[in-house]
Image (spheres, rainbow, N blue to C red):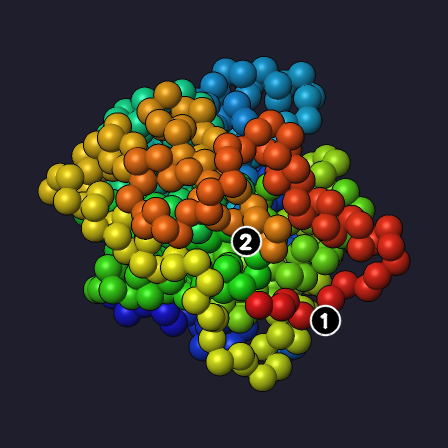
Amino acid sequence: MNGTVAPPVGRFSRHVHRSRAAGRLVVQPRMGFATPERMRAGLAAVRDLAVGPDPRALTAGTVTLDSFTRVDDHRGALRALRSGAELNGFPLVVHGPEATRAMLAGIVAEDFPLQVRHGCALPLRLLRTMAAAGVDATEGGPVSYCLPYGRVPLRDSVLAWARCCELIAAQDEPMHLESFGGSMLGQLCPPSVLVALTVLEALFFRAHGVRSVSVSYAQQTHPGQDLEALSALRRLAGERLTGTDWHVVLYTFMGVFPRTPVGAFRLVEESARLAVRGGADRLVVKTPAEAHRIPTVAENVDALEFAAAVAADEAGRVAPAGPARVTGVYEEAALLVDRVLELADDVGEALVRAFAAGLLDVPYCLHPDNANRARARVDPYGVLRWADPAGVPVARDTVPSRGPVGPWGLLGMLSFHERRCDAEDLLGRRPAEGVSA
């Protein structure tokens, strides 16, 4: 395991520890359905991948919540549910703790824990319902579940998440908390900012009593740079989260997805190989349906089985010597963490001040509390670089001067993986054997 285990550790973290010890990557879907019956069937199908003496995959269950619940509009969720509308997730608060606990009974177990993924900046009511339902883990954070999703003031989100962390820490069975900081907007945020934000959120969680956390990173546009970022994340977490149980989770690319099945599976393959080579313990997997609609249970299961098979193949290969230094991710991320923590003794207050000063600035994020002056670009080799760091304290000699990023350039960068992977399908090329650094 990447982190030092600090008891007590709950069911979710124990599962990841055991899988790591067995040399297996935990794969997990982003799956959510409106009714308890459909959600239970989906969880059972994911669990069944791990059944038997030679499981096809080691999995964790996911209940992804709907867009009404994410913004605390539970009346809207109830109306949609009663009208038969197809929600894009499970309205957990509407169904309540008793119905949720009944849905999970006989499904969730020591070798199949559950995480709720939601996207809510003010989640206290939601967290209370989760805790009453016996949920093993959740995700989010005061920055990562605030800036990308709405206009809730960052200070309000920080206060709400402080109370949520204290609620999580008070549970008899420890609940695991994953920072979503490694996936700000899904794409086009320099890796050093992603690494710094997820470590800062983990420090915030720990300051409010949570002792089992995961730090995250989302696959970006260059495999060598992503390997460097995962190495930087593991190093920085090891330095800053001493005495805390932690592990690393990687997300398959969270931005515009390829539209062809071959292109989509290629990107999933690359993420699974990256997870193994980068030392991640868990992979959140997307499906080939991402560009078109809400994936079915079967599509989620197929993607998980495929990712697990690729990961097993990669684990059997000779490991490379290690990622070469490409863009100085560790140095920038460590500097950002230090500079933010200098602003206040309280991590939450330091985060608020850092964004107010533009010291932390997520490119292209329109939230009112984000300066939105910094810019990044994908260079001709696919490396994600600063175009203009604005107030973010990075070395100016590392920033290429190629002029401002225009609207057409932005659209081109957003569709980078879509164009790359779908072009290979149209040209009739087979998916690559491995990820090239």
Instruction: Kindly identify which numbered label has been placed on residue 433.
Output: 1
Q: Is residue 92 left or right of residue 397?
A: right
Q: Is residue 297 above or below residue 24?
A: above
Q: Quadrant of the C terminus?
A: bottom right
Q: Is residue 232 above or below residue 402?
A: below
The three-letter amino acid code for the residue at tag 2 is: Val
Tally the numbered discs. 2
Q: What residue lies at 67% left-to-right and 70% top-to-bottom?
A: 434
Q: Position of residue 219 (x, y in %)?
A: 54, 53
Q: Is residue 138 left or right of residue 421?
A: left
Q: Position of residue 37 (x, y in %)?
A: 65, 39
The residue lying toward the viewer, choosing from 274 and 152, is 274
The residue lying toward the viewer, choosing from 418 and 55, is 418
Q: Position of residue 87 (x, y in %)?
A: 63, 27
Q: Position of residue 44 (x, y in %)?
A: 64, 53
The label nearer to you, 2 versus 1, is 2
Identify the residue position indicated by label 2 in the image: 383
Q: Residues within 10 Å of mark 1 (few under 14, many from 20)?
A: few
Q: Residues within 10 Å of mark 2 (few under 14, many from 20)?
A: some
